[in-house]
Amino acid sequence: MQGPILRELRAAGHAPTIPAEVGLTGAHDDEHFAYARAHGLALLTLNPDDFIALHERTPDHSGLLLVYRDNNPSRDMTARDIVRAINNLLQTGLPIAGQVHILNHWRY
């Protein structure tokens, strides 16, 4: 998660932790998942498939926020869409911890 998504998250008042800041650049998904669990962080990913399996094996985590892409710029979520979806989800008061949320559903 870098570039526009990181800028949009910070501009919206979120405090993202990125792999490069914690020595996880290029690490396997299970290492990212373990780090997020150990530090009480919800995990945002644009590569959701492996994380669903990790959730099923270890459901006690701080939350997974998944973004699915079609590789079609007219349908894929922009950085602004992703941040809006996170804020929409948070406004509902639904639990995040231990849950998997597909942000595409919160895009409105």
Image (spheres, rainbow, N blue to C red):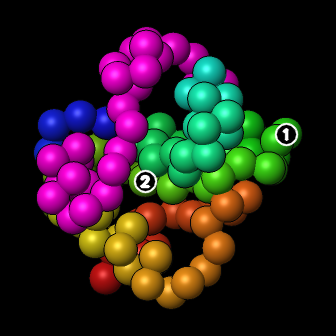
Query: Looking at this view, is 64 or 46 the one in front?
Result: 64
Q: Residue furthest bottom?
A: 92
Circle 2 SS class: loop
Q: Quadrant of residue 50?
A: top right
Query: Looking at this view, is 68 or 24 the one in front?
Result: 24
Q: Quadrant of residue 34?
A: top right
Residue at x 16% of width, y 37% of height: 3
Tell me, yes or no, if residue 59 can be seen here. yes
**Mark 2 neighbour class, 10 Å CA radius: few under 14, some 14 to 19, many 20 or more:** some
Q: What amino acid does circle 2 point to? A: Val
Q: Position of residue 82 (x, y in %)?
A: 30, 61
Q: Position of residue 26 (x, y in %)?
A: 43, 12
Residue at x 45% of width, y 43% of height: 45
Q: Position of residue 18 (x, y in %)?
A: 36, 32
**Mark 1 neighbour class, 10 Å CA radius: few under 14, some 14 to 19, many 20 or more:** few
Quadrant that contains the C terminus:
bottom left
Measured along the vertical axis of the image, is residue 91 above or below residue 72?
below
Q: Which residue is mark 2?
A: 67
Q: What amino acid does circle 1 point to? A: Arg
Tell me, yes or no, if residue 76 can be seen here. no
Per the model, the C-alpha gap separating discs 2 and 1 is 20 Å
Q: Position of residue 39 (x, y in %)?
A: 60, 38
Measured along the vertical axis of the image, is residue 42 above or below residue 47?
below
Circle 1 SS class: helix
